[in-house]
Image (cartoon, rainbow, N blue to C red):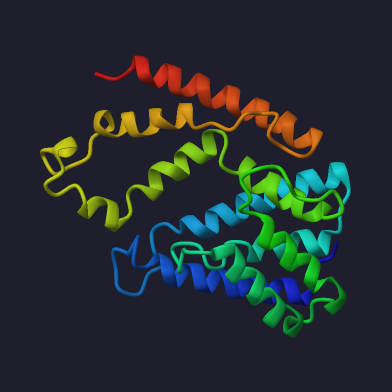
């Protein structure tokens, strides 16, 4: 669809919010610059990529999907964190129509956002766009791109400050050898490829899981 004004405004709002929040974690090397990394925005864009791919294959309401993608982590760190799905659903009901989003679809977006943190696959079939967001949110955490994002996330100031006095990093600095075990922990945490609602999602998941396992297997042999 042609990018609508409500989506431009929503994206602008989320970009500004995430950028400001990221300053506390990845401050710019100069006072006026942007933070050198913005994990939350990177994640949202990767979810958008995967949601569009699923939607184009499986068919869904693009307005509901796109709105839910950009809102779903509004209250996730670097924001307030706790109960972020419920908070984002409440924000959707209170603010989304003010951007010009179709009012009769607001509740569908709120339900998609509210359900995206469900651990088991119990989203009702009639909430198809909620299932698409759920799949896309988890697909974005798979594959080589996620490993890069994971490393960048752990270069945040709060993590680096924890290195002081940490027996794992006795020198107070972080080497690739030090960091590799943290990456290798991701191998056992990979989602199963059948834990997705749509065939297209499962196909993407299998490819990314295989690529991640292969990468980590080789990485483990290179530790020195």
Front-most of residues 11 and 33? 11
Task: From the viewer's perspective, tell me whether residue 170 is left or right of residue 36.
Answer: left
Q: Determine the residue positioned at 55% across, 52% down.
A: 43
Q: Quadrant of residue 116?
A: bottom right
Front-most of residues 172 and 186? 186
Image coords of residue 177 (percent x, y): 26, 28
- The quarter in which the N terminus is drawn is bottom right
Task: From the viewer's perspective, tell me whether residue 76 is left or right of residue 31.
Answer: right
Residue found at the far top of this picture: 221
Image coords of residue 162 (percent x, y): 21, 51
Task: From the viewer's perspective, tell me whether residue 36 is left or right of residue 206.
Answer: left
Residue found at the far bottom of this picture: 98
Q: Determine the residue positioned at 17% across, 38% down.
A: 169
Q: Determine the residue positioned at 34% across, 67% down.
A: 24
Eyeballing the image, is 18 above or below 163?
A: below
Image coords of residue 214 (percent x, y): 51, 19
Image coords of residue 23 (percent x, y): 37, 68
- The quarter in which the C terminus is drawn is top left
Q: Quadrant of residue 179?
A: top left
Eyeballing the image, is 31 above or below 202?
A: below
Q: Determine the residue positioned at 83% across, 52% down.
A: 128
Front-most of residues 2 and 139? 139
């Amino acid at each position: 669809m042609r990018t609508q004004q409500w989506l431009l405004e929503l994206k602008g709002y989320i970009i500004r919010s995430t950028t400001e929040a990221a300053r506390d974690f990845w401050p710019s090397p100069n006072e006026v610059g942007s933070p050198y990394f913005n994990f939350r925005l990177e994640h949202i864009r990767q979810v958008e990529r995967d949601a569009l791919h699923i939607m184009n294959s499986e068919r869904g309401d693009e307005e509901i999907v796109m709105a839910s993608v950009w809102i779903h982590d509004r209250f996730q760190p670097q924001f307030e964190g706790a109960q972020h799905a419920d908070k984002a659903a409440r924000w959707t009901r209170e603010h989304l129509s003010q951007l010009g989003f179709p009012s009769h679809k607001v509740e569908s977006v709120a339900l998609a956002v509210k359900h995206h943190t469900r651990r088991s696959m119990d989203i009702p079939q009639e909430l198809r766009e909620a299932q698409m967001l759920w799949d896309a949110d988890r697909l974005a955490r798979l594959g080589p791109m996620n490993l890069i994002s994971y490393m960048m996330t752990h270069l945040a100031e709060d993590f680096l400050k924890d290195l002081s006095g940490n027996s794992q990093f006795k020198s107070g600095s972080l080497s690739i050898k030090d960091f590799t075990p943290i990456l290798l922990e991701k191998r056992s945490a990979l989602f199963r490829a059948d834990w997705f609602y749509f065939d297209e999602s499962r196909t993407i998941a299998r490819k990314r899981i295989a690529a991640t396992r292969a990468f980590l297997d080789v990485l483990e042999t290179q530790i020195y």
